[in-house]
Image (tube, grey):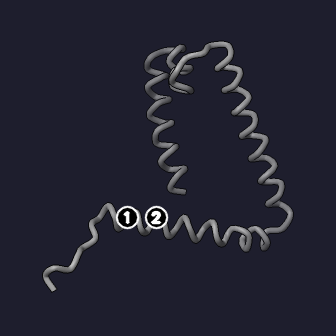
Amino acid sequence: MSSAKKIGLFACTGVVAGNMMGSGIALLPANLASIGGIAIWGWIISIIGAMSLAYVYARLATKNPQQGGPIAYAGEISPAFGFQTGVLYYHANWIGNLA
C-alpha cells in the first residue's frame, strides 16, 4: 500500500472548486424557476451592463489604441491609479472565475 498515489492540496482544491462550479451551472435553471420572472430582469440588466462596458472599451480602444486594456487606460491618469486598477482587476478576475 505504500505505492498508493496521494492527492496534493492544489489538486484537491481544484477538484472541489470544479465540482462546486459544475453543480452551480447544472442547478441554475431550477434555481431560476423558483424565483420567477424577476430572474429575466436580472439577466436583462446584466446584459445592458456588459454591453455598456464593451462599448466603453471599444471607444477607448479607437481613441487611444494601446496594449494593456483597463490598466493602461487608468495608467494614463496616474501610475498609482494604473497599479491599483491592475491589482483590483487581477483579484476580480480570480474571484469572478471562482464564483
Q: Where is residue 94 in the image (x, y as percent from the top left)?
A: 47, 47
Q: Residue furthest front?
A: 3
Q: Which residue lies furthest to the left in this view?
A: 2
Q: In this view, does 99 lie above or below 50?
A: below
Q: Is residue 69 above or below residue 26?
A: above
| Discs 1, 2 touching: Cβ within 8 Å | yes
In this rendering, the answer to whether 75 lies above or below 55 is above
Q: At 35% across and 68% down in the image, what residue appears?
A: 12
Q: Is mark 1 on a helix, strand or loop?
A: helix
Q: Residue furthest right?
A: 37
Query: Image point 37% across, 64% down: which residue?
Result: 13
Q: Residues within 10 Å of mark 1 (few under 14, many from 20)?
A: few
Give the vertical position of 69 relative to 89 (above or below): above
Residue receiving disc 1: 13
Query: Which quadrant of the rendered structure holds the N terminus?
Result: bottom left
Q: Label 2: which residue?
A: 17
Quarter residue 49 falls in = top right
The 10 Å Cα crowd at callout 2, few under 14, some 14 to 19, many 20 or more, is few
Q: In this view, does 55 lie to the left or right of 7?
A: right
Q: Residue at x 48, y 22 (%)?
A: 82
Most foreground residue, 25 or 81:
25
Question: Going by the image, does 25 lie left or right of 75?
Answer: right
Which residue corresponds to the image point at 73% horizontal and 69% vertical from the top-left?
29
Amino acid type, callout 1: Thr
For mark 2, give the secondary structure: helix
Residue 32 image point, x, y percent: 76, 67
Q: Quadrant of the C terminus?
A: bottom right
- Number of marks in picture: 2
Q: Which mark is residue 38?
A: none
